[in-house]
Amino acid sequence: MWVPQYSGHAQPVYLMIADALEQDIGSGRLNADDRLPTLKELAEALKITPGTVGRAYDEAAKRGLVVGEVGRGTFVLPAKPQATPPVQETGTSNDSAQIDLSIIKPNDANFGTWLRDSITELAHSTDLSRVLDYATDGGHAVHKQAGARWVQRSLPEARWQQIVLTSGAQHGLLVAISSLSKTQDVILCEEHCYPGIISLAHSLDRRLMGVQIDEYGLVPEAFRAACIEHRPALLVCVTTHQNPTNSIMPPERREAIAQIAREYDVFIVDDDIYGFLESQTVHRPISAYAPERSVYLTSLSKSILPALRIGYLYAPPELLSRLSSMVRSSVWMPSPLMAQLASNLINSGMGEQLVKEQQQEAAARQQMAREILGNYQISSQPNSFHIWLVLPEPWSCDEYANLARAHGVTVVSGSQFLSQRTTATRGVRIALMSPSRAELHFALTKLASLLASPEPRLFY
Ligand SMILES: Cc1ncc(COP(=O)(O)O)c(C=O)c1O
Protein backbone atom coordinates (compact mmCIF):
# COMPACT_ATOMS: atom_id res chain seq x y z
CA MET A 1 0.00 0.00 0.00
CA TRP A 2 1.32 3.47 -0.89
CA VAL A 3 2.00 5.59 2.22
CA PRO A 4 3.40 9.11 1.72
CA GLN A 5 6.55 10.25 3.49
CA TYR A 6 6.33 13.77 4.87
CA SER A 7 7.49 15.65 7.93
CA GLY A 8 7.35 19.08 9.56
CA HIS A 9 4.48 21.52 10.02
CA ALA A 10 5.32 24.11 7.38
CA GLN A 11 1.97 23.64 5.66
CA PRO A 12 -1.32 21.81 6.26
CA VAL A 13 -1.13 18.00 6.26
CA TYR A 14 -3.36 17.59 3.20
CA LEU A 15 -0.95 19.74 1.13
CA MET A 16 2.06 17.74 2.38
CA ILE A 17 0.30 14.53 1.27
CA ALA A 18 -0.51 16.02 -2.16
CA ASP A 19 3.13 17.20 -2.51
CA ALA A 20 4.44 13.75 -1.54
CA LEU A 21 2.10 12.18 -4.09
CA GLU A 22 3.38 14.50 -6.78
CA GLN A 23 6.99 13.69 -5.86
CA ASP A 24 6.35 9.94 -5.85
CA ILE A 25 4.76 10.15 -9.31
CA GLY A 26 7.75 12.18 -10.51
CA SER A 27 10.27 9.68 -9.09
CA GLY A 28 8.44 6.67 -10.51
CA ARG A 29 7.43 5.24 -7.11
CA LEU A 30 3.82 5.59 -8.32
CA ASN A 31 2.82 4.84 -11.91
CA ALA A 32 -0.14 5.63 -14.17
CA ASP A 33 -3.23 3.57 -13.23
CA ASP A 34 -1.90 2.63 -9.75
CA ARG A 35 -4.80 2.53 -7.31
CA LEU A 36 -4.29 4.67 -4.18
CA PRO A 37 -5.34 3.44 -0.73
CA THR A 38 -8.91 4.21 0.32
CA LEU A 39 -9.50 7.24 2.55
CA LYS A 40 -10.00 4.93 5.52
CA GLU A 41 -6.88 2.82 4.84
CA LEU A 42 -4.60 5.83 4.50
CA ALA A 43 -6.21 7.67 7.43
CA GLU A 44 -5.50 4.68 9.67
CA ALA A 45 -1.92 4.33 8.40
CA LEU A 46 -1.16 8.03 8.99
CA LYS A 47 -3.32 8.44 12.11
CA ILE A 48 -5.24 11.34 10.62
CA THR A 49 -8.92 11.74 9.70
CA PRO A 50 -10.36 10.38 6.40
CA GLY A 51 -11.51 13.98 5.72
CA THR A 52 -7.87 15.14 5.58
CA VAL A 53 -6.98 12.33 3.17
CA GLY A 54 -10.04 13.30 1.09
CA ARG A 55 -8.80 16.91 0.89
CA ALA A 56 -5.35 15.68 -0.14
CA TYR A 57 -6.86 13.57 -2.95
CA ASP A 58 -9.02 16.52 -4.07
CA GLU A 59 -5.94 18.70 -4.19
CA ALA A 60 -4.09 16.04 -6.22
CA ALA A 61 -7.06 15.80 -8.60
CA LYS A 62 -6.97 19.58 -9.04
CA ARG A 63 -3.30 19.32 -9.98
CA GLY A 64 -4.24 16.70 -12.59
CA LEU A 65 -2.35 13.91 -10.77
CA VAL A 66 -5.18 11.51 -9.91
CA VAL A 67 -8.79 10.83 -10.79
CA GLY A 68 -11.52 9.41 -8.56
CA GLU A 69 -13.87 6.86 -10.10
CA VAL A 70 -17.15 6.22 -8.33
CA GLY A 71 -17.20 2.74 -6.75
CA ARG A 72 -13.65 1.90 -7.94
CA GLY A 73 -11.29 4.20 -6.05
CA THR A 74 -8.67 6.83 -6.82
CA PHE A 75 -6.14 6.21 -9.60
CA VAL A 76 -2.90 7.84 -10.70
CA LEU A 77 -3.22 9.60 -14.07
CA PRO A 78 -0.58 9.45 -16.82
CA ALA A 79 2.05 12.15 -16.29
CA LYS A 80 1.51 15.47 -18.05
CA PRO A 81 4.05 15.98 -20.82
CA GLN A 82 7.06 17.67 -19.20
CA ALA A 83 8.43 19.82 -21.95
CA THR A 84 5.34 21.23 -23.64
CA PRO A 85 6.44 23.26 -26.63
CA PRO A 86 5.58 26.89 -25.92
CA VAL A 87 2.42 28.20 -27.56
CA GLN A 88 3.56 30.55 -30.31
CA GLU A 89 3.01 34.06 -29.08
CA THR A 90 2.34 35.87 -32.30
CA GLY A 91 2.01 39.23 -30.58
CA THR A 92 5.57 39.36 -29.39
CA SER A 93 7.56 38.55 -32.47
CA ASN A 94 7.10 39.02 -36.15
CA ASP A 95 9.31 37.37 -38.72
CA SER A 96 7.69 39.05 -41.70
CA ALA A 97 8.58 42.59 -42.66
CA GLN A 98 4.90 43.61 -42.43
CA ILE A 99 3.41 44.82 -39.16
CA ASP A 100 -0.21 43.79 -39.30
CA LEU A 101 -2.64 46.39 -37.97
CA SER A 102 -5.51 45.00 -40.03
CA ILE A 103 -7.21 42.54 -37.68
CA ILE A 104 -9.10 43.43 -34.53
CA LYS A 105 -8.27 40.79 -31.95
CA PRO A 106 -7.14 40.53 -28.35
CA ASN A 107 -3.45 40.89 -27.61
CA ASP A 108 -2.08 37.38 -27.36
CA ALA A 109 1.19 37.88 -25.47
CA ASN A 110 -0.19 35.98 -22.45
CA PHE A 111 -2.09 33.23 -24.23
CA GLY A 112 0.53 30.56 -23.49
CA THR A 113 0.11 29.93 -19.77
CA TRP A 114 -3.62 30.07 -19.14
CA LEU A 115 -4.48 28.35 -22.38
CA ARG A 116 -2.16 25.43 -21.70
CA ASP A 117 -3.51 25.11 -18.14
CA SER A 118 -7.16 25.25 -19.28
CA ILE A 119 -6.65 22.62 -21.97
CA THR A 120 -4.75 20.34 -19.57
CA GLU A 121 -7.44 20.73 -16.91
CA LEU A 122 -10.15 19.84 -19.42
CA ALA A 123 -8.16 16.84 -20.64
CA HIS A 124 -8.05 15.47 -17.10
CA SER A 125 -11.57 16.38 -16.03
CA THR A 126 -14.62 14.16 -15.78
CA ASP A 127 -16.43 16.60 -18.14
CA LEU A 128 -14.36 15.36 -21.06
CA SER A 129 -16.35 12.28 -22.02
CA ARG A 130 -19.62 14.27 -22.06
CA VAL A 131 -18.32 16.82 -24.55
CA LEU A 132 -16.90 14.37 -27.07
CA ASP A 133 -20.34 13.44 -28.35
CA TYR A 134 -23.09 15.24 -30.30
CA ALA A 135 -25.11 17.65 -28.18
CA THR A 136 -28.86 17.78 -28.56
CA ASP A 137 -31.00 20.91 -28.63
CA GLY A 138 -28.24 23.25 -29.77
CA GLY A 139 -25.87 22.65 -26.86
CA HIS A 140 -25.64 21.38 -23.30
CA ALA A 141 -27.55 23.26 -20.61
CA VAL A 142 -24.30 23.90 -18.68
CA HIS A 143 -22.84 25.62 -21.74
CA LYS A 144 -25.92 27.82 -22.12
CA GLN A 145 -25.73 28.62 -18.39
CA ALA A 146 -22.12 29.74 -18.76
CA GLY A 147 -23.17 31.73 -21.86
CA ALA A 148 -25.93 33.42 -19.84
CA ARG A 149 -23.37 34.35 -17.18
CA TRP A 150 -21.29 36.03 -19.88
CA VAL A 151 -24.27 37.78 -21.49
CA GLN A 152 -25.40 38.99 -18.04
CA ARG A 153 -22.32 41.23 -17.96
CA SER A 154 -24.32 43.34 -20.45
CA LEU A 155 -27.91 42.18 -19.91
CA PRO A 156 -28.28 41.30 -16.21
CA GLU A 157 -31.79 39.97 -16.85
CA ALA A 158 -30.60 37.28 -19.32
CA ARG A 159 -32.02 33.77 -18.67
CA TRP A 160 -29.99 30.76 -19.75
CA GLN A 161 -33.03 29.17 -21.38
CA GLN A 162 -32.97 31.99 -23.97
CA ILE A 163 -29.34 31.48 -24.97
CA VAL A 164 -28.42 29.92 -28.34
CA LEU A 165 -24.81 28.82 -28.81
CA THR A 166 -23.06 29.74 -32.05
CA SER A 167 -19.64 29.13 -33.58
CA GLY A 168 -18.54 32.74 -33.05
CA ALA A 169 -20.20 36.07 -33.87
CA GLN A 170 -19.93 35.75 -37.65
CA HIS A 171 -21.94 32.55 -37.38
CA GLY A 172 -24.30 34.38 -34.99
CA LEU A 173 -24.86 37.01 -37.68
CA LEU A 174 -25.55 34.32 -40.27
CA VAL A 175 -28.03 32.60 -37.96
CA ALA A 176 -29.83 35.81 -36.98
CA ILE A 177 -29.98 37.37 -40.45
CA SER A 178 -31.07 34.20 -42.21
CA SER A 179 -33.69 33.41 -39.54
CA LEU A 180 -35.23 36.89 -39.41
CA SER A 181 -35.32 37.79 -43.11
CA LYS A 182 -35.81 36.10 -46.46
CA THR A 183 -34.29 36.32 -49.93
CA GLN A 184 -34.43 39.82 -51.46
CA ASP A 185 -35.54 41.45 -48.20
CA VAL A 186 -33.94 44.79 -47.44
CA ILE A 187 -31.68 44.74 -44.44
CA LEU A 188 -30.25 47.92 -42.98
CA CYS A 189 -26.82 48.49 -41.46
CA GLU A 190 -24.53 51.41 -40.68
CA GLU A 191 -23.21 53.03 -43.90
CA HIS A 192 -19.67 52.12 -42.80
CA CYS A 193 -19.96 48.65 -41.37
CA TYR A 194 -18.08 45.46 -40.49
CA PRO A 195 -17.27 43.74 -43.84
CA GLY A 196 -18.56 40.39 -42.51
CA ILE A 197 -22.07 41.87 -42.64
CA ILE A 198 -21.62 43.01 -46.25
CA SER A 199 -20.38 39.65 -47.52
CA LEU A 200 -23.06 37.80 -45.55
CA ALA A 201 -25.87 39.93 -46.97
CA HIS A 202 -24.61 39.30 -50.50
CA SER A 203 -24.20 35.55 -50.00
CA LEU A 204 -27.70 35.32 -48.54
CA ASP A 205 -29.15 37.40 -51.38
CA ARG A 206 -30.43 40.19 -49.11
CA ARG A 207 -30.55 43.79 -50.32
CA LEU A 208 -28.18 45.65 -47.97
CA MET A 209 -28.74 49.39 -47.46
CA GLY A 210 -26.48 51.63 -45.41
CA VAL A 211 -27.97 54.18 -43.01
CA GLN A 212 -26.21 57.46 -42.30
CA ILE A 213 -23.98 57.54 -39.22
CA ASP A 214 -22.31 60.37 -37.32
CA GLU A 215 -19.88 60.44 -34.41
CA TYR A 216 -22.53 58.77 -32.20
CA GLY A 217 -23.44 55.99 -34.61
CA LEU A 218 -26.69 55.52 -36.54
CA VAL A 219 -28.71 58.69 -37.01
CA PRO A 220 -32.28 57.98 -35.79
CA GLU A 221 -34.02 60.20 -38.35
CA ALA A 222 -32.06 58.57 -41.20
CA PHE A 223 -33.13 55.19 -39.84
CA ARG A 224 -36.76 56.31 -39.77
CA ALA A 225 -36.53 57.55 -43.36
CA ALA A 226 -35.00 54.23 -44.46
CA CYS A 227 -37.81 52.33 -42.69
CA ILE A 228 -40.43 54.39 -44.53
CA GLU A 229 -38.72 54.13 -47.90
CA HIS A 230 -37.43 50.54 -47.90
CA ARG A 231 -39.65 48.58 -45.45
CA PRO A 232 -36.66 46.62 -44.14
CA ALA A 233 -36.93 43.26 -42.37
CA LEU A 234 -34.15 44.04 -39.93
CA LEU A 235 -31.42 46.38 -38.80
CA VAL A 236 -28.00 45.07 -37.89
CA CYS A 237 -25.89 47.47 -35.86
CA VAL A 238 -22.79 47.72 -33.68
CA THR A 239 -23.53 50.39 -31.10
CA THR A 240 -20.42 50.08 -28.92
CA HIS A 241 -16.99 50.61 -30.53
CA GLN A 242 -18.61 50.60 -33.94
CA ASN A 243 -16.53 48.77 -36.51
CA PRO A 244 -14.88 50.70 -38.16
CA THR A 245 -15.71 54.24 -36.93
CA ASN A 246 -15.36 53.47 -33.21
CA SER A 247 -18.42 55.43 -32.09
CA ILE A 248 -20.39 54.65 -28.94
CA MET A 249 -24.10 55.35 -29.23
CA PRO A 250 -25.51 57.29 -26.27
CA PRO A 251 -28.46 55.77 -24.34
CA GLU A 252 -31.10 58.26 -25.65
CA ARG A 253 -30.22 57.34 -29.22
CA ARG A 254 -30.36 53.61 -28.47
CA GLU A 255 -33.81 54.11 -27.04
CA ALA A 256 -34.96 56.24 -30.00
CA ILE A 257 -33.78 53.67 -32.56
CA ALA A 258 -35.41 50.81 -30.65
CA GLN A 259 -38.65 52.80 -30.61
CA ILE A 260 -38.51 53.43 -34.38
CA ALA A 261 -37.84 49.70 -34.96
CA ARG A 262 -40.97 48.96 -32.93
CA GLU A 263 -43.03 51.51 -34.90
CA TYR A 264 -42.03 50.01 -38.27
CA ASP A 265 -41.93 46.38 -37.10
CA VAL A 266 -38.22 45.89 -37.79
CA PHE A 267 -36.04 43.28 -36.04
CA ILE A 268 -32.79 44.44 -34.45
CA VAL A 269 -29.63 42.34 -34.64
CA ASP A 270 -27.56 43.88 -31.85
CA ASP A 271 -23.93 42.93 -32.53
CA ASP A 272 -22.33 43.74 -29.18
CA ILE A 273 -19.04 41.97 -29.77
CA TYR A 274 -17.06 44.91 -28.31
CA GLY A 275 -19.51 45.67 -25.49
CA PHE A 276 -17.33 43.82 -22.97
CA LEU A 277 -14.82 46.68 -23.19
CA GLU A 278 -17.27 49.20 -21.72
CA SER A 279 -19.28 49.48 -18.52
CA GLN A 280 -22.77 48.21 -19.31
CA THR A 281 -24.33 50.30 -16.57
CA VAL A 282 -23.57 53.26 -18.85
CA HIS A 283 -24.01 51.53 -22.22
CA ARG A 284 -27.02 49.27 -21.98
CA PRO A 285 -27.29 47.29 -25.23
CA ILE A 286 -29.81 48.58 -27.76
CA SER A 287 -31.65 45.23 -27.60
CA ALA A 288 -32.53 45.93 -23.97
CA TYR A 289 -34.80 48.77 -25.20
CA ALA A 290 -36.81 46.47 -27.52
CA PRO A 291 -36.20 42.92 -26.25
CA GLU A 292 -39.29 41.50 -27.95
CA ARG A 293 -37.80 42.15 -31.45
CA SER A 294 -34.07 41.91 -30.83
CA VAL A 295 -31.37 39.31 -31.05
CA TYR A 296 -28.42 40.22 -28.87
CA LEU A 297 -25.17 38.79 -30.20
CA THR A 298 -21.69 38.38 -28.79
CA SER A 299 -18.73 36.00 -28.89
CA LEU A 300 -15.54 35.25 -26.99
CA SER A 301 -13.30 35.99 -29.99
CA LYS A 302 -12.37 39.53 -28.96
CA SER A 303 -12.60 39.12 -25.20
CA ILE A 304 -10.78 35.79 -24.80
CA LEU A 305 -9.55 33.97 -27.90
CA PRO A 306 -10.57 34.07 -31.60
CA ALA A 307 -9.91 30.34 -32.04
CA LEU A 308 -12.50 29.35 -29.44
CA ARG A 309 -15.17 30.01 -32.09
CA ILE A 310 -17.85 30.23 -29.42
CA GLY A 311 -20.55 32.90 -29.42
CA TYR A 312 -23.92 33.45 -27.79
CA LEU A 313 -27.24 34.78 -29.06
CA TYR A 314 -29.86 36.00 -26.62
CA ALA A 315 -33.38 36.19 -28.01
CA PRO A 316 -37.02 36.35 -26.91
CA PRO A 317 -38.70 32.94 -26.45
CA GLU A 318 -40.74 33.21 -29.66
CA LEU A 319 -37.58 33.45 -31.84
CA LEU A 320 -35.62 30.64 -30.20
CA SER A 321 -36.78 27.71 -32.31
CA ARG A 322 -36.06 29.60 -35.59
CA LEU A 323 -32.57 30.48 -34.41
CA SER A 324 -31.73 27.02 -33.04
CA SER A 325 -32.94 25.31 -36.18
CA MET A 326 -30.69 27.59 -38.26
CA VAL A 327 -27.74 26.63 -36.03
CA ARG A 328 -28.57 22.98 -36.70
CA SER A 329 -28.90 23.57 -40.46
CA SER A 330 -25.62 25.42 -40.67
CA VAL A 331 -23.22 23.61 -38.28
CA TRP A 332 -25.32 20.97 -36.45
CA MET A 333 -23.92 22.41 -33.22
CA PRO A 334 -20.93 24.50 -32.13
CA SER A 335 -18.17 22.18 -30.91
CA PRO A 336 -19.16 20.98 -27.40
CA LEU A 337 -15.46 20.53 -26.65
CA MET A 338 -14.75 24.20 -27.26
CA ALA A 339 -17.99 25.20 -25.53
CA GLN A 340 -16.74 23.32 -22.43
CA LEU A 341 -13.38 25.08 -22.58
CA ALA A 342 -15.20 28.41 -22.92
CA SER A 343 -17.56 27.56 -20.04
CA ASN A 344 -14.64 26.62 -17.79
CA LEU A 345 -12.96 29.95 -18.55
CA ILE A 346 -16.17 31.84 -17.76
CA ASN A 347 -17.07 29.87 -14.62
CA SER A 348 -13.57 29.98 -13.13
CA GLY A 349 -13.41 33.77 -13.41
CA MET A 350 -10.46 33.52 -15.83
CA GLY A 351 -12.57 35.11 -18.60
CA GLU A 352 -13.21 38.14 -16.40
CA GLN A 353 -9.53 38.45 -15.53
CA LEU A 354 -8.58 38.27 -19.22
CA VAL A 355 -11.06 41.04 -20.02
CA LYS A 356 -9.41 43.28 -17.41
CA GLU A 357 -5.97 42.54 -18.84
CA GLN A 358 -7.15 43.30 -22.38
CA GLN A 359 -8.77 46.56 -21.24
CA GLN A 360 -5.52 47.66 -19.62
CA GLU A 361 -3.50 46.69 -22.68
CA ALA A 362 -5.94 48.50 -24.98
CA ALA A 363 -5.81 51.63 -22.80
CA ALA A 364 -2.00 51.77 -23.01
CA ARG A 365 -2.10 51.30 -26.81
CA GLN A 366 -4.83 53.93 -27.27
CA GLN A 367 -2.71 56.37 -25.29
CA MET A 368 0.26 55.59 -27.58
CA ALA A 369 -1.90 56.13 -30.68
CA ARG A 370 -3.14 59.47 -29.38
CA GLU A 371 0.41 60.59 -28.66
CA ILE A 372 1.64 59.66 -32.15
CA LEU A 373 -1.40 60.50 -34.29
CA GLY A 374 -3.01 63.12 -32.05
CA ASN A 375 -2.48 65.87 -34.63
CA TYR A 376 -4.79 64.09 -37.04
CA GLN A 377 -8.52 63.42 -36.91
CA ILE A 378 -8.84 60.12 -35.11
CA SER A 379 -11.84 58.49 -33.55
CA SER A 380 -10.78 56.50 -30.53
CA GLN A 381 -12.19 55.29 -27.21
CA PRO A 382 -10.01 54.87 -24.12
CA ASN A 383 -10.40 51.05 -24.09
CA SER A 384 -11.05 50.18 -27.68
CA PHE A 385 -9.02 47.77 -29.80
CA HIS A 386 -8.84 50.02 -32.86
CA ILE A 387 -8.89 53.62 -34.09
CA TRP A 388 -10.46 55.21 -37.15
CA LEU A 389 -8.20 57.74 -38.84
CA VAL A 390 -9.84 60.29 -41.13
CA LEU A 391 -7.18 61.23 -43.66
CA PRO A 392 -6.31 64.84 -44.37
CA GLU A 393 -6.53 66.21 -47.92
CA PRO A 394 -5.40 65.12 -50.49
CA TRP A 395 -5.21 61.48 -49.38
CA SER A 396 -7.62 58.86 -50.60
CA CYS A 397 -8.05 55.87 -48.30
CA ASP A 398 -7.03 53.21 -50.88
CA GLU A 399 -3.95 55.21 -51.82
CA TYR A 400 -2.92 55.61 -48.17
CA ALA A 401 -3.52 51.91 -47.33
CA ASN A 402 -1.46 50.87 -50.39
CA LEU A 403 1.36 53.17 -49.50
CA ALA A 404 1.34 52.07 -45.85
CA ARG A 405 1.57 48.45 -46.98
CA ALA A 406 4.50 49.30 -49.22
CA HIS A 407 6.15 50.78 -46.12
CA GLY A 408 5.56 47.61 -44.10
CA VAL A 409 2.34 48.43 -42.22
CA THR A 410 -1.01 46.83 -43.06
CA VAL A 411 -4.13 48.89 -42.28
CA VAL A 412 -7.61 48.56 -43.77
CA SER A 413 -8.87 51.12 -46.26
CA GLY A 414 -12.26 52.65 -45.50
CA SER A 415 -13.53 51.43 -48.87
CA GLN A 416 -13.70 47.90 -47.43
CA PHE A 417 -16.35 49.01 -44.96
CA LEU A 418 -18.77 50.70 -47.34
CA SER A 419 -22.13 48.98 -47.28
CA GLN A 420 -22.87 50.60 -50.65
CA ARG A 421 -20.18 51.55 -53.09
CA THR A 422 -21.85 54.87 -53.80
CA THR A 423 -20.76 56.37 -50.45
CA ALA A 424 -17.40 58.15 -50.21
CA THR A 425 -14.95 57.73 -47.36
CA ARG A 426 -11.63 59.19 -46.27
CA GLY A 427 -10.92 56.85 -43.36
CA VAL A 428 -8.65 53.92 -42.58
CA ARG A 429 -9.08 51.48 -39.71
CA ILE A 430 -6.02 50.78 -37.59
CA ALA A 431 -6.18 47.80 -35.23
CA LEU A 432 -3.87 48.21 -32.26
CA MET A 433 -3.70 44.90 -30.44
CA SER A 434 -1.82 42.38 -32.59
CA PRO A 435 1.86 43.35 -32.55
CA SER A 436 4.10 43.92 -29.54
CA ARG A 437 3.97 47.44 -28.10
CA ALA A 438 7.39 48.21 -29.56
CA GLU A 439 6.27 47.13 -33.03
CA LEU A 440 3.07 49.12 -32.66
CA HIS A 441 5.04 52.24 -31.75
CA PHE A 442 7.24 51.76 -34.79
CA ALA A 443 4.28 51.15 -37.10
CA LEU A 444 2.26 54.14 -35.83
CA THR A 445 5.28 56.38 -36.18
CA LYS A 446 5.66 55.23 -39.79
CA LEU A 447 1.96 55.89 -40.44
CA ALA A 448 2.26 59.40 -39.00
CA SER A 449 5.40 60.13 -40.97
CA LEU A 450 3.67 59.11 -44.19
CA LEU A 451 0.92 61.62 -43.49
CA ALA A 452 3.48 64.32 -42.86
CA SER A 453 5.52 63.64 -46.04
CA PRO A 454 4.98 65.97 -48.94
CA GLU A 455 3.12 64.08 -51.71
CA PRO A 456 4.59 60.59 -51.18
CA ARG A 457 4.25 58.27 -54.17
CA LEU A 458 4.80 54.59 -54.92
CA PHE A 459 7.45 53.80 -57.52
CA TYR A 460 6.60 50.99 -59.91
C1 LIG B 1 -18.61 43.82 -35.47
C2 LIG B 1 -18.15 42.41 -35.60
N1 LIG B 1 -19.04 41.42 -35.59
C3 LIG B 1 -18.68 40.13 -35.73
C4 LIG B 1 -17.35 39.78 -35.88
C5 LIG B 1 -16.97 38.32 -36.03
O1 LIG B 1 -16.48 37.79 -34.82
P1 LIG B 1 -16.15 36.26 -34.60
O2 LIG B 1 -14.66 36.11 -34.72
O3 LIG B 1 -16.63 35.91 -33.23
O4 LIG B 1 -16.85 35.44 -35.64
C6 LIG B 1 -16.38 40.79 -35.91
C7 LIG B 1 -14.96 40.45 -36.10
O5 LIG B 1 -14.12 41.28 -36.34
C8 LIG B 1 -16.79 42.14 -35.76
O6 LIG B 1 -15.91 43.15 -35.76
Image (tube, grey):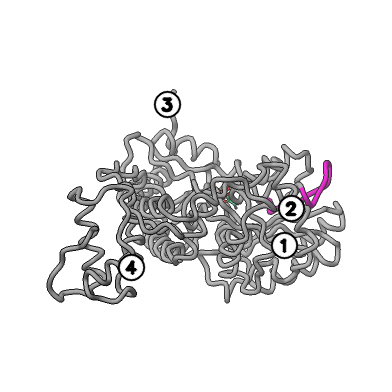
Residues at marks 4 and 2, CA–CA distance in whole angstroms = 49 Å
* Label 2: element kind: helix
Distance in Å between CA atoms under marks 2 and 1 = 9 Å
In the displayed structure, does residue 149 sit left or right of residue 368? right
Q: Residue at x 40, y 56 (%)?
A: 369
Residue under numbered circle 4? 39
Residue 459 badge: 3
Identify which residue is drawn at 43% across, 55% down. Answer: 125
For label 1, count other residues whose C-alpha is less than 10 Å away and answer few (under 14), some (14-19) or many (20+). Answer: many
| 339 up-or-down from 255: above or below | above
The residue under label 1 is 315
Q: Nearer the viewer, residue 221 or 9?
A: 9
Query: Where does the image place residue 119, in percent across and percent down from the top left?
Result: 41, 50
> Marks 3 and 1, Cα distance to the nearest angstrom?
53 Å
Residue for point 30% across, 70% down: 53
Q: Which amino acid type corresponds to the residue marked 1 in the rendered image?
A: Ala
Identify the disc placed on residue 441: none
Q: Secondary structure at mark 4?
A: helix
Q: Is residue 92 magenta?
A: no
Q: Quadrant of the C terminus?
A: top left
The reply to whether dot 2 and dot 1 touch (C-beta < 8 Å) is: yes
Q: CA distance from mark 3 to mark 4?
A: 78 Å
Mark 1 or 4 closer to N-term?
A: 4
Q: Earlier in the sequence, mark 4 or mark 2?
A: 4
Let me know if residue 355 appears in the view: yes
Numbered disc in front, either 1 or 4:
4
Q: Is residue 183 magenta?
A: yes
The part of the chain drawn in magenta is 179-191
Q: Can you give x and y, in whole percent of width and height, for residue 279 in the image? A: 53, 72
